[in-house]
Amino acid sequence: MNSAASARSAIWRIAGSLIVALALTVVPLPDFLRAARPDWVALVVIYWSVFAPQRLPFWAIALVGLALDALYGTLLGLHALALVVMAFPALRLHLQLRVFSWAQLAAAAVLLVIVYEFVLFWSNGIAGLSTRGVDYWLPVVTSAVAWPFVLYILDAVIARDRP
Amino acid sequence: MATPNPDTRAVLPALGLRAAIYVMICIALMVIDNRGNSLDLLRRSLSAAVAPIQIGVSLPVRLFDWSGDAARPRADLERENNALKVERLRTRAELQRFNALEAENERLRAMLNASAQVADDYSMAEILAVAANPYRHSITLNKGLQRGVATGQALVDANGVVGQVLDVTDFRATAILITDPDHATPVQVVRNGLRTIAEGTGEIDRLDLVYLPNSADIDVGDVLVTSGLGGVFPIGYPVARVTSIERRPEQPFAAVRAEPIAGLDRIREVVLIERAVSAADGADRPVVNPADE
């Protein structure tokens, strides 16, 4: 495969996985599970920030965030801001993160999800939108549980790219 | 895998700068969006872009509903059809009585020189999606500007008030439910006309009645209907039933909870009330508009 074709296929895979993540964020769930939905988009963005940083420019991350805002009906730019702030350390440190063991990488992913949720929490607070309850932080826990699956599936997706 | 990519290295020094630029763009977007409707076009095109995702996600559920209907035995359908016919007859009979009452009411009002209440018009809409965010109770409807849906229109189901339309695009409308933490519904107690406000709590089966003094004449089981104040909800639609009252002598107000009468977590379609605007209500703004607040 020549490099232009592989770049194109990589971009399709990234876009495809992000669309699947967006779909997973709006899949109807029973009421008691809704608060526990993992941050699929954040996890997928973390993965590609670490393993394909040059293929995931900030404008793409911001666009995905705006799509999330449209799906959630939140202030435009809210999720975009959270994703950009979260992706920055992941992009900056992607070389270190790549050599981490799986446990260290999982811990880093959870930290990044906490950053993401915190930015959302904080901007919501400034905009005067109420976010109550301890279960606001439930997605951090479920994202930690979901991370190994994201890692496994996207590793399998990326593996098809390698000779 | 850990081999540094040449173009990664070239890009890295500017990373912080670019991140800062995007952070500022996002903050600017939020501030502008928080202040008005100047981003409507962007919001609309984004909604249009993500609409296929929403439709794709709701497809299996709809397919399941449809196949359930298609696979049902004929006898079942006949039985249901018969039951519906009986039900329709009964409601029509009730409606006759209601029409007579309405006419009488109109006459009495005319005698009192009160402003005439104009009958509302109704149209149906289907719920396409429910907000994924547990802190926003909002739904997406399958009708938009094309079908005359307008911001601030009230939604009801067969039993009671559901919410109001918040945002309309060409083919879709987003509505906020009465249980959204940012929504408040002006209500009054049917039994004695006591006016209060039912605030959403973020829990689908709970509203809080705020600013009711401890001495207020309210009982568990009291039915609350829209009071028509605020100009969004037409008067007299059932909203909630009081479930618990805690009178707190040490506090200025009692803690009163109510449960919405509409099946907010079960409905698949809603009725949009098209208000015939009477001279009496000038206010056409939602009581609480979270997008603007």
Image (tube, helix red, strand yellow):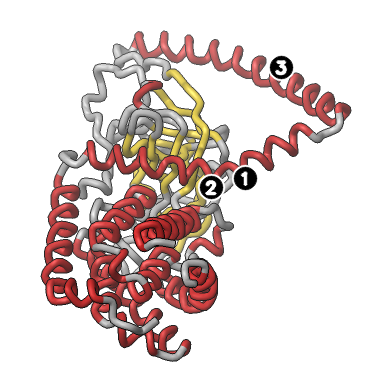
Chain holding disc 3 = B
- Please tell me in which quadrant of the rendered image residue B268 appears: top right
Q: Amino acid at mark 1?
A: Pro
**Camera-nearest label, 1 or 3:** 1
Choose the circle earlier in sequence order: 1 or 3: 1
Q: Write the residue at 20% across / 77% down.
A: B9
In the rendered image, which residue does mark 1 sit on?
B60
Dot 2 or dot 3: first in sequence order is 2
Q: Give whichever of A62, B10 is nearer the camera.
A: B10
Disc 3 crowd rating (10 Å Cα; few below 14, some 14-19, many 20+) is: few
Q: Position of residue B3 (x, y in %)?
A: 33, 83
The residue to which callout 3 is attached is: B89
Quick one: SS at disc 3?
Answer: helix
Q: SS for tag 2?
A: helix
The furthest residue to the front: A2
Q: Look at the numbered discs 2 and 3 and tell me whether their residues touch, using CB distance below 8 Å.
A: no
Q: Position of residue A3 (x, y in %)?
A: 36, 63
Asked whether, in this view, residue B136 is left or right of residue A60, the answer is right
Q: Amino acid at mark 3?
A: Leu
- The number of numbered discs placed on residues in the rendered structure image is 3
> Which numbered disc covers residue B57?
2
Can you tell which of label 2 and label 3 is closer to the viewer? Answer: 2
Q: Which image quadrant for residue B236?
A: top left
> Distance between the Cα atoms at labels 1 and 3?
35 Å
Q: Considering only vertical position in the picture, is A163 above or below A30?
A: below
> Depth check: A115 or A125 in front?
A115
In the rendered image, which quarter is residue B213 located in? bottom left
Callout 1 touching callout 3 (CB < 8 Å)? no
Q: Chain of mark 1?
A: B
Q: Residue at x 39, y 79 (%)?
A: A109
Badge 2 and badge 3 both on one subunit: yes
